[in-house]
Amino acid sequence: MAEIRVPELAESITEGTIAKWLKQPGESVEKGEFIVELETDKVNVEVISEEAGVIQELLAGEGDTVEVGQVIAVVGEGAGAPAAQPTASAPKTEEAPASTPEAATAQPAEEASSTDRTIASPAARKLAREKGIDLAAVSTVDPMGRVRVQDVEAHGTAPKAPAAQAAPAPKATAPAVEDGRETREKMTRRRQTIAKRLLEVKQSTAMLTTFNEVDMTAVMELRSRKKDEFFDKNDVRLGFMSFFTKAVVAALKKYPYVNSEIDGDEIILKHYFDVGIAVSTEGGLVVPIVRDADRKNFAEIEANIGELAAKARDNKLTLADMSGGSFTITNGGVFGSLLSTPILNGTQVGILGMHTIQKRPIAVGDKVEIRPMMYIALSYDHRVIDGKDSVGFLKMVKELIENPEDLLLGS
């Protein structure tokens, strides 16, 4: 027998949530094969089995919170069991109740409850606990008697007569289920973490935002002229993010306190330029890091951003991809945002917000012209950065984007 434990994840991560079991009781598993996906505060982690054998028992259900080092599954010997119990016929895993983990636990009848003796999936047990339902009272259509999630849900919407004697917990949610006017869903661990950290930033910083606008004419013309040549040479497309990343690095060098953080009564000035690029995913906003952006050319920055964005969308980001960072850029313009006040990222004291490009009438000398304009915003921690530096920083970003040749010559 071998125990599957939650592995060490990172110094700052002590627990996670069971996102999805990749194996079920009775299924065979090879050494090194993934058996469960854990959702942590930052990334999803797939846990492997250190031993080959058959999954004997799952000790936590999907959605349960588990701690580092906690035993979450048991793998035993028995090569014959998997062949008779393919994944598509999961109920067969309970074919002989006397040999199942649930039944083994239930052998001392005096000490075990009817719920403990009932054969059920971990997810069904969890749902039953949340609804206050006795698993022994749940009817199931499974020929082996295994209670599934849908059986528990069906029991919750049973006729009124039996429900009248049920515990009050299910009654509280019944109206929302019956009339369909409301749906209650649990926040994912990542969404909970995002909410917690954003609230902490708002409460623990003196955050202000200053704005400016950028005439994108020159950079758009340069990009239009060079994009084909750039792609042929570097096999990566030339976007706006590399221009803004380069402009931010140059501005950070001139205004070093924007590239710092507070630690107690000390300010830590960072002499490296690890720029976080906010990426939207189905699970929420993540901020992978472009390391040493000051040492990379336009092609390297574009390639790095593309790789990180692809990993984010495929849920393949690692903790190393997201750890650290000295400044962040977020681009709400890709969703059509015209103006916003971005919230600081973690302990950083500055974040640049990009927005959608919109043609507007602009005074150019003594004439009015239609130009592609973008509003940009710098949110900053006023405890470290004064108004003069914040305005100067944003003004420098604006001037560099409006004169992109300066960026090319300086890169």
Image (tube, rainbow, N blue to C red):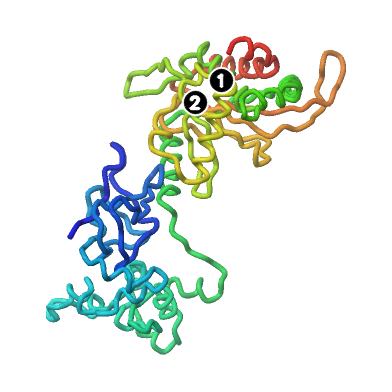
Check the picture and name the quadrant holding the C terminus: top right
Q: Residue 136 is drawn in which quadrant?
A: bottom left
Q: Hey, which residue is sitting farthest right in the picture? A: 367
Q: Residue 272 is drawn in which quadrant?
A: top left
Amino acid on which disc 2 is placed:
Val
| Residue 248 numbered mark, or none | 1
Which residue is drawn at the image coordinates 38% and 37% (left, top)? 319
Q: Hey, which residue is sitting farthest bottom in the picture? A: 161
Q: Is residue 85 left or right of residue 395?
A: left
Q: Is residue 223 left or right of residue 69?
A: right
Note whether residue 327 is visible.
no
Q: Are marks 1 and 2 in contact (CB under 8 Å)?
A: yes
Residue 200 rendering spot, x and y as whole percentages: 41, 38
Front in this rendered view, residue 58 or 282? 58
Amino acid on which disc 1 is placed:
Val
Helix, strand or loop under label 1: helix
Helix, strand or loop under label 2: strand
Mark 1 neighbour density, 10 Å: few (under 14) some (14–19) many (20 or more)? many
Q: Is residue 104 left or right of residue 61?
A: left
Residue 53 rendering spot, x and y as whole percentages: 25, 61
Residue 331 rendering spot, x and y as whole percentages: 60, 34
State whether residue 161 is above or below residue 180: below
Q: CA distance from mark 1 to mark 2?
A: 9 Å
Which residue is drawn at the image coordinates 23% and 54% (left, top)? 51
Mark 2 neighbour density, 10 Å: few (under 14) some (14–19) many (20 or more)? many
Q: Which residue is mark 2?
A: 275
